[in-house]
Image: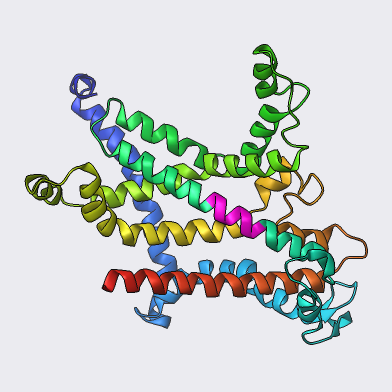
Amino acid sequence: MILISRTIPPRTRQAFSDALVKPFELLMSTLDLLLMPLQRLLGMRRMAYFFVAPNMIIFGVFILLPMLLNFYYGFTKGQSILLTKREFVGTENIETLLACEDYSNPNTCSEDLFWRGVRNTATYVAAQVSTMVLLALATALALNQKVVLRGFFRSVFFYPVLLSPVVVALIWKWFLRYDNGLLNFLLESLGYERVQFLADASWARFWVIVVSDWAQMGFYTLILLAGLQAIPASLYEAAEIDGANVWKRFRFVTLPLLMPTMTVVLVLAFIRAVQVFDQVFVLTGGGPGTATLYIVQYIFRQAFVVSPRQYGMGAAASLLLALVLLVLTLTQLYFARRSEAT
């Protein structure tokens, strides 16, 4: 580029520069002409609200307003989506969801599908978050070393994060198909029988966790890698001089200093795991049976699938989910800060 620029005559370079700068200057002068009267009217400090207003409007229309409407739907019932045609019933929807003789047995509950979703979600969160955090930590520790093509491997692990969850689910669904799936083709070529990966309850639960780990691990790996790179190298050198082996350096240096970053990862991973929907919806549809039916899919089913539509029950379930998420997240942050203080 430098050699090419030197061969271009100065007048041509100046003309090219003027052709780029003049439209920009014209645009800026036009904006000044339009905004100066507004600035005189509002004042310098209030102009900040003018620039923030578009984002606040979008937030209010697409996030805050749906949240308020959902809260109202949770305390009403009826088939109409219009607010004026819905009957206010107070906490009846929530009481129906919580009505259960034995919470360990969903068949004794008024809304057995809701409690099946709760049980499935709890199992999924425990398995998915633990395996994903361990894999992300191991990958971050490996990428933090001086390995060949380290930048390439970082991009490879992060690439699935850039894909749409629907695309990820479709790729894995093709990979796991019984009739012409790649994995079953490999098993058959090795002399094994084909396996109903998505039609067997145990296999379906297993592959839902595997797909989620594969799709999300790169994001948390980069967060942990940033935390690892923030640890001063002098601490490792001092620990090595004191005779600490690899395990002791990890336990007494890496892990304590990585805990603030690990807390962020755990909170984000936990919230995302509880809200799992799109990948599972495309991959298994909640099946076989109710093996992979999770809370968010139950909410979607009640509001948009069953007939007649039960908007109130779906909204009430989402309110309970939000409350549980809030309590568990605050509890997790409390214990994390307490451990840091000690």
Q: Picture quarter containing residue 152?
A: top left
Q: How is the image coloured?
A: rainbow
Examine the rendering and report whether any part of residue 182 can be seen.
yes
Q: Picture quarter containing residue 36?
A: bottom left
Examine the rendering and report whether any part of residue 73 can be seen.
no
Q: At which x and y percent is residue 29?
A: 37, 59
Considering the image in quadrants, where does the N terminus appear?
top left
Q: At which x and y percent is residue 60?
A: 60, 72
Residue occupying the far left of the picture: 241
Q: Is residue 98 left or right of residue 29?
A: right
Q: At which x and y percent is residue 256?
A: 27, 59
Residue 55 vs residue 17, the one in the foreground: 55
Residue for point 62% across, 60% down: 122
Give the vertical position of 128 relative to 200 (above or below): below
Give the vertical position of 295 relative to 16 (above or below): below
Q: Is residue 312 left or right of residue 148?
A: right
Q: Picture quarter containing residue 317?
A: bottom right
Check if residue 122 falls in the magenta segment: yes
Q: At which x and y percent is residue 75?
A: 77, 82
Give the vertical position of 155 relative to 266 (above or below): above
Residue for point 47% across, 36% down: 159
Q: Main secondary structure of the magenta part?
A: helix
Considering the image in quadrants, where does the C terminus appear?
bottom left
Q: Is residue 30 left or right of residue 236?
A: right
| The residue stretch that appears in magenta | 121-128
Residue 248 vs residue 139, the one in the foreground: 248
Residue 86 vs residue 265, the one in the foreground: 265
Residue for point 75% across, 21% down: 180
Check if residue 270 falls in the magenta segment: no
